[in-house]
């Protein structure tokens, strides 16, 4: 493994760890806040952190694959194993697309709730449940 690619990957992992720490701190707030609008704001922020994490892993995967660093690519691949079949970059971009769509729907729920369709309202409920479940997991983790 080349030292330059390893250093870049280590830097990206450190950034991902910072994002994960921010998500963990935000999780506690999401679980304690009662105001619906405030909770939607926090959920959007959580999803934005998640989007940032996927973007960082996309950068790392592109660098690893373009430099023939199979060990780094396999490490990232292991993180995206539960997300289906296909090429690594394709899986990451699929997750980016889902997260981006979640953010769009949540922003619409925040800013224009009266314009939400039935399907979008249902998506907001499911996205909120998904994020709340993740928040519970984050609060259970040891520092």
Image: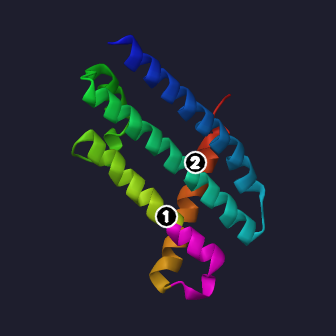
Contact (Cβ within 8 Å) of mark 1 with mark 2:
no
Q: Quadrant of residue 138?
A: top right
Which numbered disc flags the more N-terminal residue, 1 or 2?
2
Residue 72 position within the rendered picture, expressed as x and y whole percent measured from the top left: 34, 23
> Can residue 133 be seen?
no
Question: Which of 69/98 is in front?
Answer: 69
Give the magenta part as a residue range: 104-116
State the predominant SS element of the stretch in magenta.
Answer: helix
Tell me, for residue 67, which label it has, or none.
none
Which residue occupies the extreme front position in the image? Answer: 4
What x and y, as percent, mark residue 12?
A: 49, 29
**Mark 1 lies on residue:** 102
Q: Which secondary structure lies at badge 1?
A: helix
Q: Indicate which disc residue 49 carries.
A: 2
* Residue 116 in sight from this viewpoint: yes
Q: Residues within 10 Å of mark 1 (few under 14, many from 20)?
A: many
Of all residues, the one furthest to the bottom in this rendering is 114
Image: 60 above or below 100 = above
| Label 2 environment density (alpha carbons within 10 Å; few <14, some 14–19, many ≥20) | many
Name the residue nearer the viewer: 57 or 116: 57
Residue at image location 28% in from the left, 21% down from the top: 69
Q: Residue furthest left?
A: 86
12 inside magenta stretch: no
Residue 106 on the magenta span:
yes
| Residue 24, position as x, y percentages in the image | 66, 41
Q: Residue at x 52, y 71 (%)?
A: 105
**Residue occupying the point 35% across, 26% down:** 75
- Tell me the residue at 21%/45% (across/down): 86
Q: Secondary structure at mark 2?
A: helix
Instruction: Give me the C-alpha separation between circle 1 and circle 2.
Output: 12 Å
């Amino acid at each position: 493994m080349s030292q330059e690619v390893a250093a870049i990957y280590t830097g990206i992992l450190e950034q991902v760890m910072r994002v994960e720490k921010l998500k963990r701190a935000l999780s506690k707030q999401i679980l304690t806040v009662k105001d619906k609008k405030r909770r939607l704001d926090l959920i959007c922020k959580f999803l934005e952190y998640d989007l940032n994490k996927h973007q960082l892993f996309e950068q790392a995967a592109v660098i690893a694959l373009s430099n023939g660093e199979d060990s780094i690519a396999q490490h990232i691949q292991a993180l995206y194993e539960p997300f289906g079949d296909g090429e690594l970059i394709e899986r990451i971009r699929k997750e980016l697309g889902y997260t981006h769509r979640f953010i769009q729907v949540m922003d619409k729920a925040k800013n224009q709730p009266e314009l939400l369709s039935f399907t979008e309202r249902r998506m907001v409920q499911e996205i909120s449940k998904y994020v709340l479940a993740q928040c519970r997991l984050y609060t259970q983790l040891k520092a």
